[in-house]
Image (cartoon, rainbow, N blue to C red):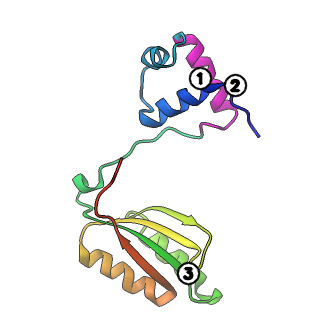
Amino acid sequence: MFQLRDQTDLNILKELTKNCRIKANHLAERVHLTAPAVAARIARLEDAGVIKRYTIEVDTEKLGFDRQVFIQAAVKNATQRAGYDALIHQYRNAIRHHYRVTGERPYLIEGAFHTRAELNEFLLALGQVATYTVTDVIDELI
């Protein structure tokens, strides 16, 4: 297990989580180090695999994905697993994240669909290979 050097490492990670494009000199000011020291710590965290990748967060509503949902699913039986996997792949543009989780339904799908009809089409197909429950997203809280 990797050990963070100190609270400053954790603060660097928190700042990068908020904005992965922050300039090194701005980040250095926030964590009270020099820019070269911050760059060295980031390189160490990357080399250790603590920082796996840099990414962006997209406002799905601005792209027209107005139906945001969480779907808990369980494949009906082992013979339908291939159909489930194919369906997930078919809808990969609408599925933001797909997790294996604990509990009664071992899959959690985070989806964003353009319309209620598109979501319904996915759910009808999903119902052929899995049981599921849907939770609609009303608003994101920060």
Rendered position, 36 above or below 70: above
Locate the N terminus by quadrant.
top right
The answer to whether mark 1 and mark 3 are in CB contact below 8 A is no
Query: At 51% from the left edge and 64% from the top edge, which residue is drawn?
Result: 98
As drawn, the label of residue 8 is 1
The answer to whether mark 3 and mark 2 are in CB contact below 8 A is no
Is 131 contained in the magenta span? Answer: no
Residue type at tag 1? Thr
Residue type at tag 2? Arg
As drawn, the label of residue 29 is none
Query: At 44% from the left edge and 80% from the top edge, which residue is drawn?
Result: 133
Residue 42 percent location from the top left of the image: 59, 25
Mark 1, secondary structure of its residue: helix
Is 45 contained in the magenta span? Answer: yes
Residue denoted by label 2: 5
66 horizontally vs 21: left or right: left
The stretch of residues the image draws in magenta is 35-51
Residue 49 percent location from the top left of the image: 67, 38
Residue denoted by label 3: 74
- Asked if residue 121 shows in the view, the reply is yes
Residue 60 percent location from the top left of the image: 29, 55
- Mark 3 / mark 2, whichever is N-terminal: 2
Mark 2, secondary structure of its residue: loop
Rendered position, 129 above or below 19: below
